[in-house]
Amino acid sequence: MMSINAIFDVAGSAMSAQSVRLNTVASNLANAQTASSSIGQTYRARHPVFAPLYEEQLGATGADAQPGVQVLGIVESDAPLQPRYEPHHPLADAEGYVYYPNVNVVEEMADMISASRSFQINVQMVEAAKTLAQRVLALGQ
Amino acid sequence: MAISFNSALGVHEQALMVRERRAGVLAANLANADTPHYQARDLDFQALIRQAAAAQGGARLRATQGAHIARAAGGDGELLYRTPMQPTLDGNTVDGDIEMAQFARNALDFQASLTFLQSKFRGLRAALKGE
């Protein structure tokens, strides 16, 4: 039963990583049109960095240890911001420019679909593991 | 010969353990489908089960000296790397569809092994009761 229990941990870590990813997508899309008056204050697109999470963190050891997923951190995109000439904007700077975030909406939508697909796959995996564990428990009855 | 659980259950017990391990490996692949540089892994079920069957059929490798390494039950076959079908930019070799199909099939095989074991137990119980 070790491996089957490990599936719950592995899939759980993946689900939490994917939900962090969905969260960053949500925050990027929500702030896609958040203008500001200087480059330093402008929102930048955020993306999580995934890495395998090895056994010592999950508590399993030896052959049963399978890597889960961890979020190493969230990085801000280096892509250039979009300055727009909008002199009537209340946040426009002295030259009449406002700065819009470097969020690529198309990329974010694709990321959102990918994250929710991966989340679903992990949910399915947990359900399959649950069925298997129940069958094992019913063995010999 | 008295009833021995080891010989009564046959290879199914080993098969179940290998399939369980494989479920864990495939689950880790699916979980890491979006992790950069993660390489999909898998077990060679046939090799492991052949090894287990050979161990049961008498051709057992014995540890005759202290320096020999004991073979773990259920097969300690090495984890292999899957050959990627399509290279990805981030170095990840997990193909979600393949892994999902393998996982589903492995789950089905696992249930088949369980069913075999169940019927073995039923047979043992019938033999013990002598009805």
Image (tube, rainbow, N blue to C red):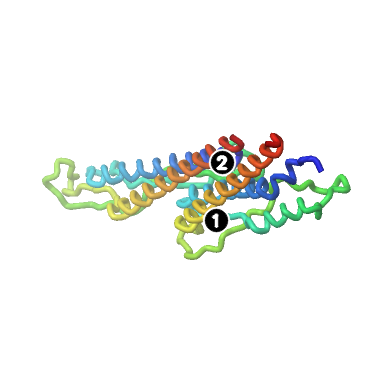
Residue at 53% of width from left, 44% of height from top? A68
Instruction: Give the amino acid type for the residue marked by disc 1 in the picture.
Output: Gln
Amino acid beneath label 2: Ile
Q: Position of residue A37 (x, y in %)?
A: 22, 43
- Which sits in the foreground, B76 or B31? B76
Residue A58 located left or right of residue B36: right
Picture coordinates of residue B84 (x, y %)? Answer: 52, 63
A102 relative position to A138: left or right: left
Can you say which quadrant of the picture contains the N terminus of chain B?
A: top right
> Closer to us: mark 2 or mark 1?
2
Residue toward you, B50 or B30 = B50
Q: Residues within 10 Å of mark 1 (few under 14, many from 20)?
A: some
The quarter of the picture where the C terminus of chain B appears is top right
Q: Residue furthest left?
A: A88
Quadrant housing residue B43: bottom right
Q: Which residue is mark 1?
A: B39
| Coordinates of residue A92 in the picture (x, y in percent) | 17, 44
- Circle 2 packing at 10 Å, graded few (<14), some (14-19), many (20+), is many
Q: Which chain letter matches label 1? A: B
Q: Residue at x 57, y 35 (%)?
A: A137
The residue at which mark 2 appears reads as A4
**In this rendering, does residue A97 appear at all?**
yes
- Quick one: which residue is furthest to the right in this view? B65
Q: Give residue A24's quadrant in the image.
A: top left
Q: CA distance from mark 2 to mark 1?
A: 21 Å
Q: Nearer the viewer, residue B30 or A39?
A: B30
Label 2 resides on the chain identified as A
Out of A77 and B115, give the one closest to the viewer.
B115
Kindly state the secondary structure of the residue where label 1 is placed: loop
Q: Is residue B7 left or right of residue A126?
A: right
